[in-house]
Amino acid sequence: MHGIRKRLISIFVIVSIVVTACPFSPFLTVSAFGAEAEEQEKKEFIKWVDFNVPCQAMKKAISLDIESQDKDVKLNFIELLAYLAAKNGNDFSRYKDAQLTDVAEKLNSGKSMAELTANMKYYNYYHEVYSAVLSGFVGNFEIEVPNEDGTGKHWESRYGIKAFSPIAKNYPYSHYDDFGKKRSYGYTRPHLGNDLIGQVGTPIIAVEGGVVEALGWNMYGGWRIGIRSLDQKRYYYYAHLRKNFPYRKDLAVGSVVKPGDVIGYLGRTGYSLKENENNIETYHLHFGMELVFDESQKECNNEIWINVYEIVNLLENKRSQVVKNQETKDYSRVYDFRDISTLSE
Ligand SMILES: [Zn+2]
């Protein structure tokens, strides 16, 4: 019975999103949750909700989550962040770690999150949004690590951040918060991702595992790869890949990749109807994340692309080490990974 009720509720939520969200701007689809969104629209509290959780807040919430795993009260970093957003009205400009430590203390002293958020109108909304953005980022996994004596490697079980930086280990890059800045090719439109400027040929890494959904030429993105997370909620977009050698050779639409796998190589292709053209000025990776709450949103005029700048910062030191195969010229990861929490829900 419980399952049917849950399904009905989720159908209602999806219908509400579609009905209320579609006529509005792409950003509104993030904030549009049925009656709440209509109310927001009328009262003009929030015109849209963008993902603006600072890297520092994500790090703190994740460390509280990790530290609680062997304690009686388990803290969940997504709940902690949703609490904070509901409390501060999505304004993180005065964020301090103490704000999260305070919530953690209340939870540790026996209060439940339901009690703490009883009067917070938007807690469920932020929880839903942050779950969509971040639910693939922390969990149980196994990873190969180097042996202490310097010979070979062995598997270790861990709980923590299981996503990787899109740039391989030991490859430099620079970036700034360029989300929403104007871009013009064909027509003027906002920039819906983060540009990571680096050296040509830099191995590009799958941030999260999933299924390759798009691979090929796109007039804007050039050679690009789109990877959908296994829970279907996130679509990762990696664009402007290298002329003549854009992808890891064995990848195709339908391939399954793991977080930390090499997927392609940094380049400057794109802005051309003709394939394999280097029409972008600067060598860089365009990295983007689209949220998909309902399949109808995947390709439409109201696609939900979030600002991944702080996410890239969160993953700055989570780099996958790679090695080149001299025969094939392809790179591959040195330390393998197994996700042991995948599809556990
Ligand atoms: Zn870009």
Image (cartoon, grey):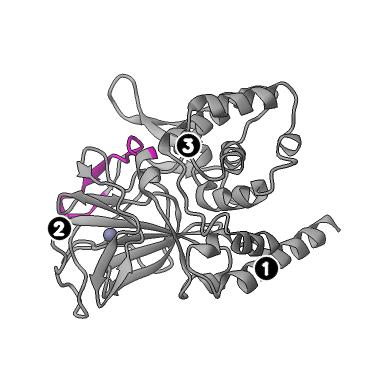
Going from the N terminus, do you reach mark 2 or mark 3 first? 3
Q: The residue under label 3 is which amino acid type?
A: Met
Going from the N terminus, do you reach mark 3 or mark 1 first? 1
Disc nearest the viewer among 3 and 1: 1
Q: Secondary structure at mark 3?
A: helix
Going from the N terminus, do you reach mark 1 or mark 2 first? 1
Magenta stretch: residue 232 in it? no
Give the quarter of the image for residue 4.
bottom right
163 left or right of 331 in image: right
Q: Position of residue 172 (x, y in %)?
A: 19, 41
Q: Quadrant of ligand 1?
A: bottom left
Q: Secondary structure at mark 2?
A: loop
Mark 3 closeness class: few <14, some 14–19, many ≥20 residues within 10 Å: many
Q: Is mark 2 within 8 Å of ligand 1?
A: no
Residue 259 visible from this viewpoint: yes
Q: Nearer the viewer, residue 148 or 174?
A: 174
Give the quarter of the image for residue 31.
bottom right
Magenta stretch: residue 320 in it? yes
4 lies above or below 301? above
Q: Position of residue 32 (x, y in %)?
A: 60, 62
Disc nearest the viewer among 1 and 2: 1
Mark 2 closeness class: few <14, some 14–19, many ≥20 residues within 10 Å: some
| Residues in magenta, as a range | 314-331
Q: The residue under label 1 is which amino acid type?
A: Ser
The label on residue 58 is 3
Q: Position of residue 248 (x, y in %)?
A: 27, 59
256 lies above or below 71? below
The label on residue 16 is 1
